[in-house]
Image (cartoon, rainbow, N blue to C red):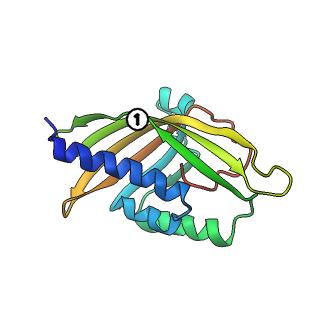
Amino acid sequence: MISLERRLVIEDLLHAYVHCIDEDRLEEWPGFFAAACEYRIVPRENADQDLPIPLMSCDSQGMLSDRVTAHRRANIFGPHFYRHLVSSILLTEQADGLIAARSNYVVFRTWADVVQYGATEVFSTGAYHDRIVFEDGRAKFRQRLVIVDTCRIDSLLVTPL
């Protein structure tokens, strides 16, 4: 059974993660992951059929940092910001010492460009399937699998989900 203290630490991790993204503090985003980690965004259709093809895949904290650098310096996209809503969390202790966490999410995107300024739309819905490890008393993602229901992405998938 997962202790109340650990449950609260994990809930804080999930909420701090989405606040980091929503507040555009992306340089802090890789710090939510263990050094050996995996971050994948997979369409639900592929996940349901156990197909390995993701929309995005990063397999280390360094790759996550590279993604942030590309976001800031290389990618071209319209100015926007996200707002995440995350459901309650289902936790399961795993035999390997990791904790599995499942939650649902909705991401709203609000445009900040001249043409669409202030227009808000549902950008993505789906589920987080996480494997969490404790390092030095802190919870971190060993694996974050983002299963997107909305697999039709109308623009560059540039900001982490």
Q: Is residue 131 left or right of residue 105?
A: left
Would you identify the image quadrant in which residue 86 lies?
Answer: top left
Q: Quadrant of the N terminus?
A: top left
- Classify 10 Å Cα crowding around label 1: few (below 14), some (14-19), many (20 and above): some
Residue 33 shown left or right of residue 84 in the figure: left
Estimate the x, y position of residue 149 in percent, counting from the top left.
57, 31
| Identity of the residue drawn at 55% across and 41% down | 53
Q: Is residue 19 above or below residue 131?
A: below
Residue 33 seen by the camera: yes
The answer to whether one can see residue 96 in this image is no
Task: Give the quadrant of residue 72.
Answer: bottom right
Residue pictured at 53% horizontal, 69% vertical? 66
| Relative image position of residue 150 (x, y in whole percent) | 62, 33
Q: Residue at x 47, y 51 (%)?
A: 18
Total labels: the figure holds: 1
Please say if 45 is above or below 60.
Answer: above
The extreme front residue here reads 118
Residue 106 vertical placement versus 55 (above, below): above
User: Disc 1 marks which residue?
Assistant: 103
The residue under the point 86% across, 53% down is 115
Q: Nearer the viewer, residue 24 or 43?
A: 24
Inspect the image, locate mark 1, and give the three-letter code of the amino acid beneath it. Ser
- The location of residue 152, given as percent across then percent down, is 69, 36
Rendered location of residue 56, percent (x, y): 56, 50
Q: As displayed, is residue 52 above or below residue 23? A: above
